[in-house]
Amino acid sequence: MMIDVLLLDVNETLSDLEPLRDRFVAAGLPAHSLDAWFAATLRDGFALTAAGAYADFRAIGGDVLAAQLADAGIEPTGERIDGVLSGFTRLALHPDVEPALRRLHERGLRIVTLTNGSVAMSERMFADGGILPLLEHRLDVSAPQRWKPHPDAYRYAAEVCGVPVERMGLAAVHPWDVDGARRAGLQGYYIDRRRTPYPKAFLPPDLAVADFEGLADALQAKAK
């Protein structure tokens, strides 16, 4: 089935997180701390959602970073933590994103973002990257107070857009997000930037492509 709305994950899917490594180093941590920090932030957000509770990305990420700093013998001051996390507002889009989304927008596809972060974190990136005018809505999980991959997060996006979930497709680099979208009734599109095997324990994606240019090609082919 061809979709009416393309729902986009933001962190890593649209944004290149690599520049954040320099901020971890400036705070006194090794560059690879970014990977452990991001995974732990997602873990704790998922855990709170599973327990029926909620905290936002900044609060959880700040707690995880404070623990990393303390473990390294570095005082977890607010200045150090903000110095790292403020980097999210200065990230750039992956180069394939803008031309591919423009193609899909010109074909009439509605484009919406849904992040476990906050809408404000990505506003500058979307404006600088030229995709802000292409986005019908920019959503985060603060309204449903359920982090993706909880089904309520995807259903919230469908309600905002006024479409049934089966008329939406989610594109993400994270298999857990693709799986969550599929279980909620959406189509799931795996953006396999790192050429990593998709987990067999998850529902398979409806499409698996290398980047957004590949997704645009595949969706345009399905529309014919």
Image (spheres, grey):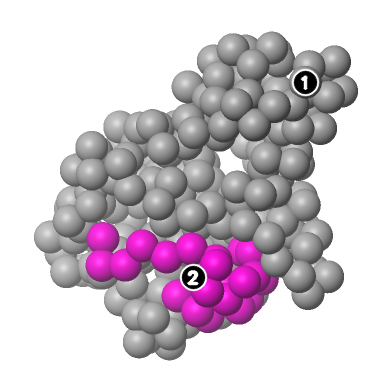
**Vertically, is 22 above or below 53?**
above
Q: Amino acid at mark 2?
A: Gln
Picture coordinates of residue 8, whole percent (x, y) = 42, 58
Crowdedness of circle 1 by 10 Å Cα count: few (<14), some, many (20+)? some
Q: Residue at x 55, y 26 (%)?
A: 83
Q: Identify which residue, 116 or 207, lies in the foreground.
A: 116
- Image side of residue 89 versus residue 18, left or right: left
Picture coordinates of residue 148, whole percent (x, y) = 62, 64
* Disc 1 from disc 2: Cα separation: 45 Å
Dot 1 corresponds to which residue? 75
Q: Is residue 158 visible?
A: yes
Whether tag 1 and tag 2 are in contact, CB under 8 A, the answer is no
State which quadrant residue 149 falls in. bottom right
Picture coordinates of residue 95, whole percent (x, y) = 30, 32
Dot 2 corresponds to which residue? 187
Helix, strand or loop status at disc 1: loop
Q: Residue at x 33, y 48 (%)?
A: 123
Helix, strand or loop status at disc 2: strand
Q: Identify which residue, 135 or 104, lies in the foreground.
A: 135
Q: Which one is closest to the eye, mark 1 or mark 2?
A: 1
Q: Residue at x 62, y 36 (%)?
A: 196
Magenta segment: does it hold 138? Answer: yes
Tell me which segment is drawn in magenta: 135-157
Q: Is residue 35 visible?
A: no
Q: Amino acid at mark 1?
A: Glu
